[in-house]
Amino acid sequence: MSSSRKQSNKKNKQNTNKEARILSDTLLTFLKSNPSAPLNTKQISSKLGFETKEEQDNIYKALQTLLLLGEIEEVQPGKFIARKPFQVLSGRVDYLSSGNAYVISPESEKDIFIHARYLANAYHGDIVKVVLFPKKGGSPEGEVLEVVERGKSEWVGTLAGSPTNMYVNPDSNRIPFAIYIPLDVSKGASPGMKVVAQITDWPVQQGMDARGEILRVLGKSGENNAEMHAILEEYGLPYEFPPEVEEDAERISFDLPQAEIKKRRDFRDTLTFTIDPADAKDFDDALSLKELGDGKWEIGVHIADVSHYVTPGSRLDKEAVKRATSVYLVDRVVPMLPEKLSNGVCSLRPNEDKFTFSAVFVMNENAEVLEQWFGRTVIHSDRRFSYEEAQEIIEGKEDDFSAPILLLHKLAQIMRGHRFKDGALRVDQAEVKFLLDENGKPIDVYFKIQREANQLIEEFMLLANKKVTEFVALPKGKKRSRPFVYRVHDLPDESKLQDFASFVKTLGYHLELDNPKKISKNINALLAEVQDKPEGDMIRQLAIRSMAKAIYSTKNIGHYGLSFDYYTHFTSPIRRYPDVLVHRLLQTYLDDENANPKESDLEQLCNHSSERERLAAEAERASVKYKQVEFMLERVGRVYAGVITGVTEWGIYVEIEETRCEGMVRLREMRDDFYFFDEKRMAVFGKSRKKSYRLGDRVHVLVNKVDMDRRQIDLLFENL
């Protein structure tokens, strides 16, 4: 073959390849512009104007090439779409005890599941980049590409090993490795001590251990103080005030300056009292009552004027912002404000003059608000009642304060009835409480339920919170609301409600969801139906979990659970920072109705307060869990009645009715048969004997083992 002919063939081949690439690029561009409609060769040819058989054959070949290159995919036989590019998102790791994790990303509506083998060296709380796997429907899954930022480097745990080879076993099941501690950075701690360790060298992959140093020694593992401090450390909650903050608090006087008293509305001669828990010392609120005649009463809701003492930008204020909330563990209160303020200067103690911020209402016998007034006041509480003492009066005990308490009780019950008629949710739960000995050891467990005395205070606090919000949000003559801090509660997630309805159906109950306006009333009816049933507490908990979490925000969406269009927190500034903000904002608008605080600053404080509230609630639950497990430590071998509250592929969770402690019966310990988990029916079935265990079943269990380090109770079914 001549060289000129070879060159000609080579040139023709190059032209053919070039034409094929151009055609492939044209097809890919076209398919990308039609991402949702799978098309076949004939449809593509028609839309691009290729009509001859040769042109259609070339399109078919180009499609096959693109398919091999992974640029397109064949979603139906002979039908193609452009493959979506791999999506990379950023988010925070939520590590599971199973070793798997979820990544919570603001860029994804659903949390992204990450199998343990795709976690790389990412751990709980880390900010990571993940690539999503191509997937049709269902929950998104992905793989960690890199750790952008470590979320947490300090971990609480128990020091173990020998004096020359020590390591920390973290308390949290969200960290799957031990932390090796060299002797020269052990702070003199010895095995058996509860410590806070900082990781200095992270494991390069899952299954390896870390290296670190001891930051703080909390005490001996198992001792009450050490364990409670460990819980606070675990959630990043400070339990000591900086010395300079304590000093600032100590300089504040109990005396009320006459010049300041003259600026305030004086209620010291009006009948006033407080109703609080028997062991409370931080009295946030008081009620006053004065009869006006013609079936009208002046009722004052008086709230501790914390904002008078804690001024913006002060060291006291900065520390209060940092904490954002008081924390209520089983055996102690960790206050937002130093004790001099929380239990002293600000607390509305009896027989003392106190500065307050008040919401004052003129009401009739139908609990209708005829007039309202908001402003700074001075009060003198005539008496302090515990809830138990007030309840005795409501139930008929004679007392000098019987008339005012019974009147307020009557009005509170009317307001309560209106709330539930309007669609407010009834999700009150019994609170688990412990009787502790002098060493903090639980010697008894009991349940605290809400009674009419609690409801009396609750309804007037709700009234004040609601009316303050309406006053700010609905200013007369204004077209839009003013910047404010709202307490908001979103509508329930539809899929969670459907799951809840499906679950209660398996227990023989019906929850109607067709009419959105009646969902809350239908939930109330269901909860009333299961009130005294063994499975009632579990169903209440699941109902709460199906709801959104209430948060603080400058964007008002109303409060679904209370059925209020406008709501805030005004009534507990000693223990909640948002209430302090609300007091300041209210005074700002009382002084200048055209004031315009910076909304972005308020939103930042709202987000911070919501997060601190979440951490405090988790710490409170952790302290209850610890005491529940500790209480069961000396009850190994006893048999208790319980209710199945969870079913998994590895075991069955049972809540003991007498103590509300939850433990697990492991499937491997159920040796009378081979049991398997049916996820759809949320039940465990025996293969041979066909015995079943379902959510909500009432059972009897034996306490087999208690592990304080893991906070776990191992149970066995009785007579199995």
Image (tube, helix red, strand yellow):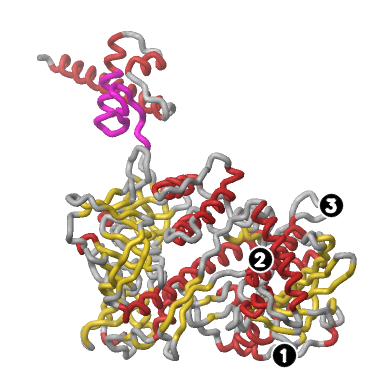
Nearest the viewer among 504 and 567 is 504
Q: Is residue 394 magenta?
A: no
Quadrant placement of the N terminus: top left
Q: Is residue 205 visible?
A: no
Nearest the viewer among 58 and 97 is 97
* Residue 227 against residue 552 in the figure, above or below: below
Indicate the secondary structure of the residue bearing disc 2: loop
N-terminal of the pair, mark 1 or mark 2, is 1
* Residue 523 against residue 301 in the figure, above or below: above
Please state the extent of the stretch shown in magenta in the rendering: 59-84
Q: Are marks 1 and 3 in contact (CB under 8 Å)?
A: no
* Residue 283 against residue 31 in the figure, above or below: below
* Residue 16 against residue 325 in the figure, above or below: above
Please name the amino acid that badge 2 sits on: His
Give the residue at mark 3. Answer: 477
Indicate the secondary structure of the residue bearing disc 3: loop
Give the residue at mark 1. Answer: 253
Expressed as whole percent of the image width and height from the top left, the position of residue 263 reads 85, 78
Indicate the secondary structure of the residue bearing disc 1: loop
Categorize mark 1 by other alpha carbons within 10 Å: few (<14), some (14-19), many (20+).
Answer: few
Q: Image check: 462 left or right of 262?
A: left
Expressed as whole percent of the image width and height from the top left, the position of residue 489 reads 59, 56
Q: Nearer the viewer, mark 1 or mark 2?
A: 2
